[in-house]
Image (tube, grey):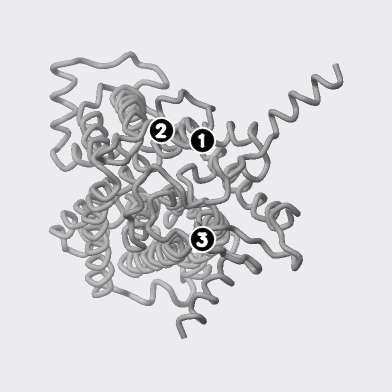
């Protein structure tokens, strides 16, 4: 019993051997730092800025949401830098799955891997349904009414949607096709919509600031006597930061591009830091513009910016906001669908999923079987299910992945087999060696120093 149990335990917790050359891959290293940065910005910024901001302002933080986003951005950056360090040291497609396998063993890697797969599938399906719903609202519920008239209602349960969402199904399939065409094609597709979204954000901030009323931030409310900037107090600001943290989810998707980055030791950490900076800046300025346009008590919880412009007499501006929201949802969907097959591919390579999902198409250099099967499954989920509750539940899995990756950074920093005599870490990149001491920021400083 003893030896058998020990043998089983060894298999459960055996660590992944990354080999001598971590740059070796069957995929094509064609992505630049800009490609990966825009992939991260698109995945994180999504449509959450148009939906989440109004709810947090109205119900939790008031104008102090500006500080909530800064605080949440700093906390997210700490976790993102752990992913960046791993992504530079081990530029593989599995992201948190691979890092967990290297750090704490196969059993935890299997759990985290499936968490990530379900996170991306359900997240993509939810975004697709939101995309469809947003378009339908612009068309006066024409899609919903037509579908119900011709196809009828689905069974009324807690899991199924009101009707089969054909638009969401088609949107997922279209994005999956772009993903299957190759990493460069899919990132170019993502970059177009990310830039459109960023232009809309600049417009909303710039035009919104022309309506700014700074008295909404200063002094106390004469009726209630509470601070205009901190109407719910410092506790409200901190509670808002907890909600705003989920607006940054998506930075882990950057690491899945490590196996296709031309220079991952530089591209992954730099893209992570730049994308986090861009997203935090966008969130802060958007929330500032919103809370300076209208009193926080008048902010619409779901259509905040459209409603704010309408209150200021600029009804036409809601169409620009709608363009940004649809572009943001598109990039968020691309980010999830880009990361999904690469996580499946990494697990299949290690034998934890069917080996067929590790097949790389010779022309496009992407795991096409994983794209087709898991893309189709995601499309079916988007077609049939109302999965908002499940997505909220899977946030637990996302936070668990973030926690384990952060712990693995510490574990690998002090693992004797990966240290030299000075206690620092050396990782081979082909015929070059990257020396790790103080972490990812230390590495970037050395790159800057060498250039000088």
Of marks 3 and 1, the one in the foreground: 3
Helix, strand, or loop for circle 2? helix
Q: Is residue 50 above or below residue 123?
A: below
Of marks 3 and 2, the one in the foreground: 3
Residue denoted by label 1: 394
Q: Is residue 185 above or below residue 294?
A: above
Helix, strand, or loop for circle 1? helix
Q: Residues within 10 Å of mark 3 (few under 14, many from 20)?
A: few
Question: Which is more N-terminal, label 2 or label 3?
Answer: 2
Give the Cα separation between the discs numbered 3 and 2. 41 Å
Q: Are marks 1 and 2 in contact (CB under 8 Å)?
A: yes
Is 2 situated left or right of 407 in this image? right
Give the Cα separation between the discs numbered 1 and 2. 9 Å
Residue denoted by label 3: 431
Quarter of the image for residue 211 reads bottom left
Helix, strand, or loop for circle 3? loop
Give the percent coordinates (x, y) of residue 105.
Answer: 66, 37
Task: For residue 300, say whether it is visible.
Answer: no
Determine the residue positioned at 23% across, 48% down.
185
Is 102 situated left or right of 160 in this image? right
Give the percent coordinates (x, y) of residue 287.
Answer: 38, 64
Is 427 situated left or right of 210 in this image? right
Question: Which is more N-terminal, label 1 or label 3?
Answer: 1
Task: For residue 357, say whether it is visible.
Answer: yes
- State the residue in front, 294 or 76: 76
Give the percent coordinates (x, y) of residue 302.
Answer: 33, 47
Give the percent coordinates (x, y) of residue 176.
Answer: 27, 36
């Amino acid at each position: 019993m003893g030896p058998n149990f020990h043998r089983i335990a060894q298999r459960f917790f055996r660590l992944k051997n990354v080999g001598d050359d971590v740059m070796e891959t069957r995929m094509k290293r064609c992505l630049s730092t800009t490609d990966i940065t825009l992939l991260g910005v698109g995945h994180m910024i999504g449509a959450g800025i148009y939906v989440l901001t109004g709810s947090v302002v109205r119900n939790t933080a008031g104008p102090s949401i500006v500080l909530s986003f800064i605080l949440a951005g700093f906390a997210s950056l700490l976790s993102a830098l752990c992913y960046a360090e791993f992504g530079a040291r081990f530029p593989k497609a599995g992201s948190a799955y691979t890092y967990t396998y290297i750090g704490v063993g196969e059993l935890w890697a299997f759990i985290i891997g499936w968490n990530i797969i379900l996170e991306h599938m359900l997240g993509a399906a939810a975004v697709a349904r939101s995309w469809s719903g947003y378009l339908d609202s612009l068309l006066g519920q024409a899609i919903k009414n037509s579908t119900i008239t011709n196809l009828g209602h689905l069974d009324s349960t807690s899991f199924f949607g009101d009707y089969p969402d054909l638009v969401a199904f088609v949107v997922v399939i279209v994005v999956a096709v772009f993903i299957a065409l190759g990493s460069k094609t899919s990132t170019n597709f993502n970059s177009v919509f990310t830039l459109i979204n960023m232009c809309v954000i600049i417009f909303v901030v710039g035009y919104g600031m022309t309506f700014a009323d700074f008295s909404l931030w200063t002094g106390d409310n004469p009726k209630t006597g509470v601070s205009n900037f901190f109407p719910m107090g410092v506790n409200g600001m901190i509670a808002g930061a907890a909600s705003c943290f989920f607006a940054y989810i998506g930075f882990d998707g950057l690491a899945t591009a490590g196996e296709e980055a031309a220079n991952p030791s530089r591209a992954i950490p730099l893209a992570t830091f730049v994308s986090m900076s861009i997203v935090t800046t966008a969130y802060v300025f958007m929330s500032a513009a919103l809370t300076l346009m209208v009193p926080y008590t008048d902010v619409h919880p779901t259509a905040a910016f459209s409603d704010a412009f309408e209150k200021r007499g600029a009804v036409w501006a809601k169409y620009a906001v709608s363009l940004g929201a649809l572009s943001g949802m598109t990039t968020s969907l691309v980010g999830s669908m880009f990361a999904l097959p690469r996580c499946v591919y990494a697990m299949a390579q290690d034998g934890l999923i069917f080996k067929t999902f590790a097949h790389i198409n010779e022309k496009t250099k992407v795991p096409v079987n994983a794209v087709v099967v898991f893309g189709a499954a995601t499309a079916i989920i988007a077609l049939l299910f109302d999965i908002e509750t499940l997505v909220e539940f899977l946030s637990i899995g996302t936070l668990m992945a973030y926690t384990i990756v952060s712990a693995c950074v510490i574990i690998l920093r002090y693992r004797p087999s990966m240290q030299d005599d000075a206690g620092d870490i050396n990782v081979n990149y082909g015929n070059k060696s990257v020396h790790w001491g103080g972490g990812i920021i230390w590495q970037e400083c050395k790159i800057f120093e060498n250039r000088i």
